[in-house]
Image: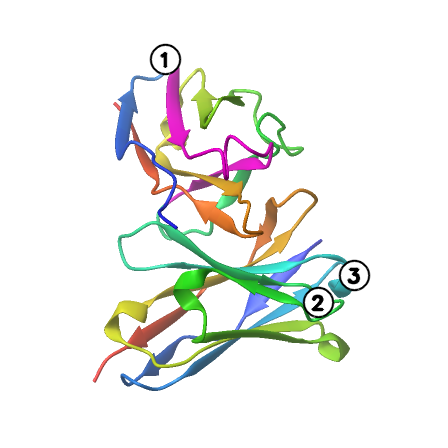
Amino acid sequence: QSALTQSASVSGSPGQSITISCTGSSSDVGGYDYVSWYQQHPGKAPKLLIFDVTNRPSGVSHRFSGSKSGNTAYLTISGLQADDEASYYCTSYTVSGTVIFGGGTKLTVL
Amino acid sequence: QVQLVQSGAEVKKPGASVKVSCKASGYTFTASYIHWVRQAPGQGLEWMGWINPNSGVTKYTQRFQGRVTMSRDTSISTAYMELTGLSSDDTALYYCAREGIGWRLDDWGQGTLVTVSS
């Protein structure tokens, strides 16, 4: 099964908002509300940002939000900060009972 | 607090096998699935599979079927991932992660670097 599709890179200036998309199919993203997003800084383990499409774990900034439309999920980061510069990955549960990751999006804060 | 502590870096020759451990603490080990995820140098995250520590039931992604075995020892709250038939393509950082509710990976180990080189 191929990875979920994410744009390779995105950039924004401090204070701006950016949105990262994650496209799958009706067998994964479109079929279940089990989409999560992770942030990974270089040399660090991934960190959960969003789960079940829209929910934030305690301790995650309100600047991070998630949504979904059809087979595509979105992560929006508002009020960009320098520390947001990282790679972002989406995941989804699949009809096969497995989990699939997106290819990752590298965010550059200009 | 939840902690997942993985075993140290490994260097293996092509064709060999590697077994990585993941020792859990700070929660009831049998209450949460453990997932394994790998990341090749400079590449993205790749999901490998999960194990239910309570029952021992596993689920692997098709790409690793026949080469990967996930197991656990509940007496020491430790999960294992064994990968056989290693090639240079298996050089990667291997992570274990604890699943919260709903297929989210709440807590991650520090990663174990496996290098495959002749």
Asked where in the image residue A86 lies, by quadrant, the reply is top left
Magenta region: A17-41
Eyeballing the image, is A22 above or below B33?
Answer: above
Eyeballing the image, is A63 above or below B2?
Answer: above
Badge 1 crowding class, 10 Å Cα cut-off, few under 14, some 14 to 19, many 20 or more, is: few
* Residue drawn at the location 31% of the way across and 60% of the way down: B40
Badge 2 crowding class, 10 Å Cα cut-off, few under 14, some 14 to 19, many 20 or more, is: many
The outermost residue toward the top is A16
* Residue drawn at the location 35% of the way across and 40% of the way down: A104
Secondary structure at numbered mark 3? loop
**In this view, the mark in front (2 or 3):** 2
Q: Nearer the viewer, residue A25 or A4?
A: A25
- Mark 1: amino acid: Gln
**Badge 1 sits on which subunit?**
A
Q: Nearer the viewer, residue A62 or A1?
A: A1
Q: Nearer the viewer, residue B27 or A37?
A: A37
- Mark 3: amino acid: Thr
Residue beneath label 2, please?
B53
Secondary structure at numbered mark 1? loop
Q: Decide: marks 2, 1 in contact (CB < 8 A)?
A: no
Secondary structure at numbered mark 2? loop
Q: Position of residue A6 (x, y in %)?
A: 33, 34
Q: Position of residue B80 (x, y in %)?
A: 57, 74
Horizontal relation, residue A25 to residue A105: left or right: right
Horizontal relation, residue B25 to residue B83: left or right: right
Residue beneath label 1, please?
A16
- Mark 2: amino acid: Pro
Asked where in the image residue A78 lies, by quadrant, the reply is top left
Q: Decide: marks 2, 3 in contact (CB < 8 A)?
A: no
Q: Position of residue A70 (x, y in %)?
A: 48, 22
